[in-house]
Amino acid sequence: MAENSQVYDLVIIGGGPAGMTAGMYAARARMNVLLLEKLSPGGQILNTDWVENYPGFPEGIGGFDLADRMKSQALRFGLPVEAAEVTRLDLSLPVKQVVLAGGTVVRSQSVIIATGATWNKLGVAGESELLGKGVSYCATCDGPFFREAVTAVVGGGDSAVEEAVFLTRFAKKVYLIHRRDKLRATKIVQERATANEKIEILWNTVVTEVLGTGKVEGVGLNNVITGRKTVLELEGLFIFVGMRPNTGFVGSEIQKDPRGFIVTNLYMETNIPGVFACGDVTQKDFRQIANAVGEGANACNSAERYLDRLHAGSN
Amino acid sequence: MAGKNVLQVTDESFDEDVIKSDLPALVDFWAAWCGPCRAIAPIIDELAAQYDGKIKVVKMNVDENPKTPGKFGIRAIPTLILFKQGSVAEQITGAVSKSHIEEAIKRLV
């Protein structure tokens, strides 16, 4: 993208459901808006095989398909989208500066941060070394490499349990390794896992290391109740143990919670006037497409009201 | 799924197109069922255009060509491998930003 001397009304950083919804509302409001996305729009739904809790699709919808539909809906109203990675924000002046990889600066009256979150690493030995060689954070991407293999999923939330069920399409055995004695996943999702003969749940168990040379060959396990240590032989380890926010480019001037998620109020305002946040990057208990979309609409509306006040003040 | 500068290679053509290539080659291992592969596809096309004549950018569909990914131990996609004079010089797993891929390319050209 070339040097850009204009000052946008609104720059949206991130093209997942939250950012795309904010962008669609902004385009319809005829704001001078730009959406920046480091990959192509879609966000985490692109990693999702099937979405069945997003209203309006009674039979469910594929993750790809939903992302495509959100994108074409936003583009239909003229939302400009640039493939660019944001490396830094300078929020010290009333006109905010969004710095891109390569050094280009995009200037805007207001900014919406919608950069989402990424799966946490377990932080155990062997995990990073064996990434892509049996360690995975995306079952829909990598599941088909494990036909007739023994695999395990780590975690107990919706994603972990859904991905375990998904993996049974390929793997001959899926262990679900969970550190507690009950799952956090939605009941209907739990029911599918317990009804599936290929899934075996290892309760009160944590992974202590990933074993293997050049490829995953097993994991070290520790039962947190009995303290018993075992080795489980397997080829694939899929890790879904909570998320970390994608806020590497966001400085300390923006208030975050202890885990790094951006703190907003009900209007999706951060502590800096004119800077808003929405979707998985914000502090909350429950990260869903449905609330990301709602927050995106809300953030855009708040940005619009902020601009109105700004223009009223300058007249 | 590929821009005009991006050749689709197969298990059969891999040796000729990648291993024996005079230019360094960037191979994007992908499949239709992989969302993040779609997400980086436009970036790969851009890089192919940008580094035209300096590197050769190719794609391999792992569904249709299981042998080569097997040979390189690939069990995750997207995986990008940069080959120089027939050997693996850089390997990137997962969807990463354009600047990340570009840094790897710049180390080779």
Image: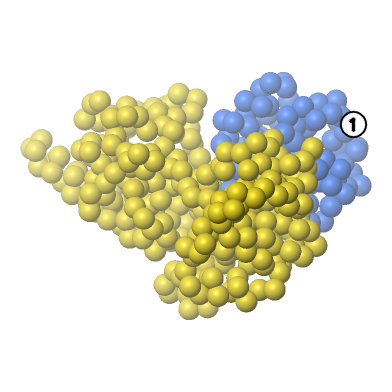
Chain colours: A yellow, B blue
Q: Is residue A204 left or right of residue A215?
A: left
Q: Is residue A29 above or below residue A173?
A: above
Along the viewing direction, whichever of A103 and A49 lies nearer the viewer: A49
Q: Residue B46 in the image: x percent, y percent?
A: 62, 37
**Residue occupying the point 57% across, 30% down:** B99
Q: Is residue A254 left or right of residue A154?
A: left
Q: Is residue B32 above or below residue A311?
A: below
Which amino acid does the dot numbered 1 rest on?
Lys
**Residue occupying the point 25% across, 25% down:** A92
Choose top left, top right, bottom left or bottom right for residue B42: top right
* Res A166 visible: no
Along the viewing direction, whichever of A251 and A58 lies nearer the viewer: A251
Along the viewing direction, whichever of A173 and B61 lies nearer the viewer: A173
Locate the C terminus of chain A and report the quarter of the image it occupies.
Answer: top left
Along the viewing direction, whichever of A276 and A71 lies nearer the viewer: A276
**Residue occupying the point 60% across, 73% down:** A194
* Res A247 visible: yes
**Residue occupying the point 78% across, 46% down:** A217
Choose top left, top right, bottom left or bottom right for residue A168: bottom right
Q: Residue A257 in the image: x percent, y percent?
A: 32, 41
Q: Secondary structure at mark 1?
A: loop
**Would you name the residue on which mark 1 appears?**
B20
Q: Is residue B22 left or right of residue A274?
A: right
Q: Residue A265 in the image: x percent, y percent?
A: 23, 49
| Chain letter of disc 1 in the image | B
Q: Residue B58 in the image: x percent, y percent?
A: 76, 40
